[in-house]
Image (tube, rainbow, N blue to C red):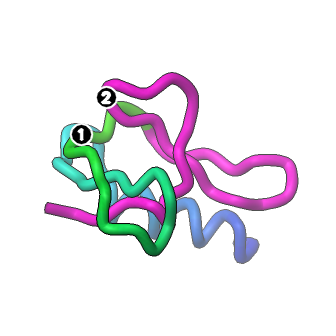
Amino acid sequence: MTDLERALMDAEADFPIGRRVRYYPVSGYSEHVESAIRSKPWALGHGAIVIAIEGKAGGVYITHLEVI
């Protein structure tokens, strides 16, 4: 198993579909939006892991999410 496959499995365990999260559009700022996970995570070409949340098109970086 590669490091990326392991990271994807960890992200899926941390952020299962339906889990409530806070999404921080700008990392390090307190402004956030409460939402829920709506997909399994996937990796972009350069290896960053993203996931779809309710209310946003496309994927958001998992580093910008906090479990509620």
Q: Position of residue 17 (x, y in %)?
A: 28, 40
Q: Earlier in the sequence, mark 2 or mark 1?
A: 1
The Cα atoms of the two marked residues, 2 and 1, are separated by 6 Å
Left or right: 24, with 27 as reference point? left
Q: Is residue 57 magenta?
A: yes
Does the CB distance between marks 2 and 1 fall below 8 Å? Answer: yes
Judging depth in this view, the residue of 27 and 39 nearest the camera is: 27
Quarter of the picture containing the C terminus is bottom left
What residue would you read off at disc 1?
36
Q: Is residue 29 above or below residue 3?
A: above
Q: Position of residue 57 (x, y in %)?
A: 51, 23
**Quadrant of the image occupied by residue 8:** bottom right
10 Å crowding of disc 1: few (<14), some (14-19), many (20+): many
10 Å crowding of disc 2: few (<14), some (14-19), many (20+): some
User: Farthest residue toward the right?
Assistant: 46
Q: Position of residue 28 (x, y in %)?
A: 45, 74
Magenta stretch in the rendered image = 40-68
Q: Say what amino acid the circle numbered 1 marks.
A: Ala
Q: Position of residue 46 (x, y in %)?
A: 86, 57
What residue would you read off at disc 2?
54
**Quadrant of the image occupied by residue 47:** bottom right
Q: Is residue 15 magenta?
A: no
Judging depth in this view, the residue of 4 and 26 nearest the camera is: 26
Q: Say what amino acid the circle numbered 2 marks.
A: Glu
Dot 1: element:
strand
Quarter of the picture containing the N terminus is bottom right
Q: Residue at x 75, y 72 (%)?
A: 2
Dot 2: element:
loop
Q: Is residue 15 above or below residue 60?
A: below
Q: Residue at x 76, y 47 (%)?
A: 44
Image disc number at residue 2: none
Q: Residue at x 71, y 76 (%)?
A: 3
